[in-house]
Image (tube, rainbow, N blue to C red):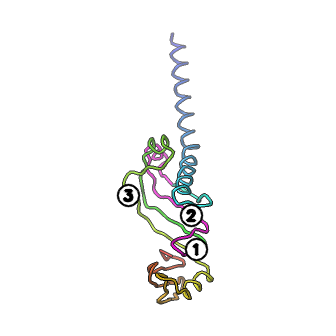
Amino acid sequence: MFRALLALLAAALLLCTVVLISTYTFLPPLLANLVARDLQNRLGLSERPEVDLTNDPPPNVLLGRFEEGRVTITNPELGGVRPDKATVDFRPFDLDMLGSLASGRIRGEGSLSGALRVELSEEEVARLASSSAPGVRVTGVELGERYLAVGGGGFGDARAGEGGGGL
């Protein structure tokens, strides 16, 4: 009887270990793929975006708590502006893990906040600067030591470069 109980305890411990290791190994990439597929479908993107979700400490993934997230979209079209790349860095956020996995769509808990960075080629900035399209107008350009700030109507003020937010 003691041996059977010991064997059962060892099997339960082994099963818990396998489940825990599998959760850390397979769940984060599964979630990142789910987020990428969901964004691709919702935004009508031709390519899946690159998604990186960070959770520390690792048990937080089971609770749907993430310290940060990054979504990178290559060659998107944003309201007539064609950046080379758009990156969104999210601040800490929570996901409804069971609802997301069950539905195949990302379900958040609360609102998301973060920073958007859009990289424009020189050609795209020149195109926008010379554009006579309604709502797209460059009203000023400021060049700093490590950034370029573009002011305009229709797409707001933008700042690009190291340490800059926004565009």
Q: Nearer the viewer, mark 3 or mark 1?
A: 1
**Which residue occupies the extreme top position in the image?**
1
Residue 74 magenta-drawn? yes
Q: In what element is the residue under mark 1?
A: loop
- Residue numbers of the magenta segment: 54-83
Q: CA distance from mark 3 to mark 1?
A: 26 Å
Q: Residues within 10 Å of mark 1 (few under 14, many from 20)?
A: some
Between discs 1 and 2, the one toward the N terminus: 2
In the image, what residue type sits under mark 2?
A: Thr
Q: Are marks 1 and 2 in contact (CB under 8 Å)?
A: no
Disc 1 marks which residue? 83
Q: In what element is the residue under mark 2?
A: strand
Q: CA distance from mark 2 to mark 3?
A: 19 Å
Q: Are marks 3 and 1 in contact (CB under 8 Å)?
A: no
Q: Nearer the viewer, mark 1 or mark 2?
A: 1
Count of residue discs: 3
In the image, what residue type sits under mark 3?
A: Ser
State which quadrant residue 24 falls in: top right
123 lies left or right of 4: right
Measuring from the top left, give residue 28's x and y in whole percent: 54, 48
164 lies left or right of 48: left
Residue for point 42% across, 46% down: 96
Disc 2 marks which residue? 72
Residue for point 46% across, 68% down: 115
Residue 130 magenta-drawn? no
Between discs 3 and 1, the one toward the N terminus: 1
Between discs 2 and 3, the one toward the N terminus: 2
Measuring from the top left, give residue 150's x and y in whole percent: 49, 84
Disc 3 marks which residue? 111
Q: Are marks 2 and 3 in contact (CB under 8 Å)?
A: no
